[in-house]
Image (tube, grey):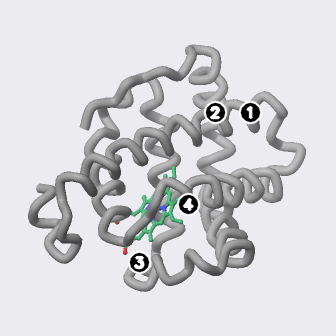
């Protein structure tokens, strides 16, 4: 998967500075994200019918990996590929990303409260949409290449 890195060095610096907060609160943020998502947008719940019970942990881990490798995003290319493949199989659409992003950012604000500066919130907002765009683009490619979702995991390898 090719990553066109358009994040500014300023945003990257803020993302990196938030690593200790993420390490401490990442799991709580991820758990709260799904609570908000399912509460506000119950229509997406069926997409998660086959998701593993540790889904919040997987999300927290992927956010942490992004934070730790923000200067070398090539290191998370294979993680992004796996996420994209799972999303295509689960029928995630570009329109879902706004719902997910709002839920994630609300969870960040609720859990971190005053511990997160405006600067951190705004850097994470930008990073979220950057990350989301990478996934959307890749998922579009995979969906176009693979018309039979039943066999998506085989064809997309
Ligand atoms: C930047 C945004 C997102 C990130 C970082 C993210 C991250 C992840 C991760 C790490 C996994 C687990 C992959 C694995 O099994 O290793 C996953 C799976 C999944 N995600 Fe996302 N996700 C995002 C957006 C979304 C959106 C917008 C939706 C739809 C509302 C969604 C729905 C799902 C579903 C349904 C699965 C489970 C698939 C399965 O195993 O059955 N995700 N995501």
Q: Which-is-in-front pick, marks 4 and 2?
A: 4
Residue identified by numbered label 2: 126
Q: Measured along the vertical axis of the image, is residue 70 above or below residue 45?
A: above
Q: Residue at x 80, y 40 (%)?
A: 116
Q: Do the residues under discs 2 and 1 have CB atoms within 8 angstroms?
A: yes
Q: Measured along the vertical axis of the image, is residue 45 above or below residue 64?
A: below
- State the SS at label 1: helix
Disc sitting over residue 96 in the figure = 4
Residue found at the very far top of the displayed protein: 9
In the image, is the residue at mark 4 within 8 Å of ligand 1 by its beta carbon?
yes
- Classed neighbour count for the residue bearing mark 2: other residues with Cα under 10 Å, few (<14), some (14–19), many (≥20): some
Q: Position of residue 53 (x, y in %)?
A: 46, 81
- Classed neighbour count for the residue bearing mark 3: other residues with Cα under 10 Å, few (<14), some (14–19), many (≥20): few
Residue identified by numbered label 1: 122
Q: Position of residue 48 (x, y in %)?
A: 46, 78
Residues at marks 3 and 1, CA–CA distance in whole angstroms: 30 Å
Residues at marks 4 and 3, CA–CA distance in whole angstroms: 16 Å
Q: Residue at x 83, y 43 (%)?
A: 115
Disc nearer the start of the sequence (2/3)? 3
Residues at marks 2 and 3, CA–CA distance in whole angstroms: 27 Å
In the image, is the residue at mark 3 within 8 Å of ligand 1 by its beta carbon?
yes
Q: Position of residue 94 (x, y in %)?
A: 49, 54
Disc nearer the start of the sequence (4/2)? 4
Q: Nearer the viewer, residue 38 or 151?
A: 151
């Amino acid at each position: 998967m090719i990553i066109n890195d358009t994040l500014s060095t300023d945003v990257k610096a803020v993302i990196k500075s938030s690593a200790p907060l993420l390490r401490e609160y990442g799991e709580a943020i991820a758990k709260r994200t799904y609570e908000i998502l399912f509460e506000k947008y119950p229509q997406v719940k069926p997409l998660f019918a086959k998701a593993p019970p540790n889904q919040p942990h997987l999300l927290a881990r992927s956010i942490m990996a992004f934070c730790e490798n923000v200067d070398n995003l090539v290191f998370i290319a294979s993680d992004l590929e796996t996420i994209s493949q799972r999303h295509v199989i689960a029928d995630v659409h570009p329109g879902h990303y706004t719902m997910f992003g709002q839920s994630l950012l609300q969870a960040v604000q609720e859990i971190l409260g005053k511990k997160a500066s405006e600067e951190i919130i705004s850097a994470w907002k930008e990073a979220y949409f950057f990350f989301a765009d990478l996934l959307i683009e890749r998922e579009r490619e995979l969906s176009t290449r693979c018309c039979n979702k039943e066999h998506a995991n085989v064809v997309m390898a």
